[in-house]
Image (cartoon, rainbow, N blue to C red):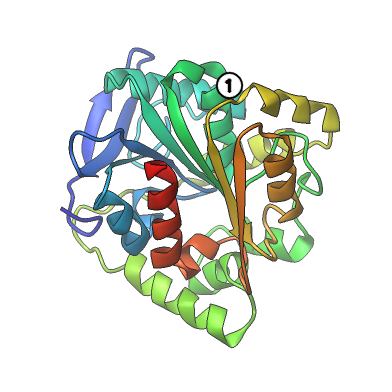
Amino acid sequence: MTQYTTPNRTIEASNGSTYAYRRYGKPGTIPVLFFQHFRGNLDNWDPTLVDDIAQQHEVILFDASGVALSKGPVPTTFQEFGRDALAFIGALELTKVNLFGFSIGGFTAQEVALQAPHLVHRIILAGTGPQGGRDMHGWTEQARSHAMKDVQGAEDILYLFFSPSYASQGKGQEFVGRIFTRTEDRDASITLATRDAQAAAIIDWGIQDFSKLSRLTSIQAPTLVANGDNDIMVPTVNSYLLAGHLPHATLKIYPDANHGFLFQYPHEFAAEVTTFLAA
């Protein structure tokens, strides 16, 4: 199985929500649970990145409640997204997980680690930031025009996720091709109502309040923090804040890269993740 072929599954949780997910990879390992970005669904995960990680670990991709094929109310804060994720984890009867949070998925992963530390083995926080961090309270006008567009296209992905350089844009074109290769059993698109609920939660999370950084000291699991050197969605300075306040953090910054550095360097970042999880 690969991200191109693994089937969509569903499971109902105790909170009444039904979750769409994909699960494959190396059995008998602590699974890596992936938390997706703003407006993302199962098909927005880069097959190259996830398949590389799946060679050494079981991987689980899922849609939060009310997102894409999942059914139920969309959470309105990232504390609620954390509880929602725990309902999904409980439905699968998982007792230990690795968390991989990208962008707003990293906000949710932090909440899962704070709300259920006993479940968490290791954490990967990619292109994300802490609650109350720096320059996170809304996007620039140009970034917002791409992020909030009712119907997004490849040009929006290339602007928001990749740097303007020729090399980065070329890698972005390759990424777009990969995520649209799968034609059967694709996930549903994100509704505008879900987009707006996620956007409101982002605004709330991003209200600058450096006192919130003290929460990070309670996350004791080893954590890999990574980003591009010029993230325009969650400014890169917030990766430094995470690494500086998490007790057991390692920081990796990728050059000539924006928010989607992990899709620009999929093999390299998968290798970094695999090494980190094996330590």
* Residue nearest the observer in this picture, 235 or 28: 28
Question: Image height check: is 216 above or below 130?
Answer: above
* Residue nearest the observer in this picture, 188 or 132: 132
Q: In the rendered view, does 10 fall on the left or right side of 67?
A: left
Q: Residue 163: horizontal and vertical position, in percent?
A: 63, 74
Question: Image height check: is 57 above or below 97?
Answer: below
Residue occupying image coordinates x 53% and y 67%: 157
Question: Image height check: is 198 above or below 188?
Answer: above
Q: In the rendered view, does 202 fall on the left or right side of 121?
A: right
Q: Quadrant of residue 212?
A: top right
Residue 127 visible in this rendered orientation of the protein: no
Furthest-bottom residue in view? 166
Mark 1, residues whose alpha carbon is within 10 Å: few (<14), some, or many (≥20)?
some
Q: Amino acid at mark 1?
A: Leu
Could you tell me which quadrant the C terminus lies in?
A: top left
* Residue nearest the observer in this picture, 189 or 264: 264
Identify the element where label 1 is drawn.
helix
Q: In the rendered view, does 81 fall on the left or right side of 146?
A: left
The residue indicated by pointer 1 is: 114
Residue occupying image coordinates x 18% and y 50%: 6
Residue occupying image coordinates x 58% and y 87%: 166
Q: Residue 268: horizontal and vertical position, in percent?
A: 44, 65
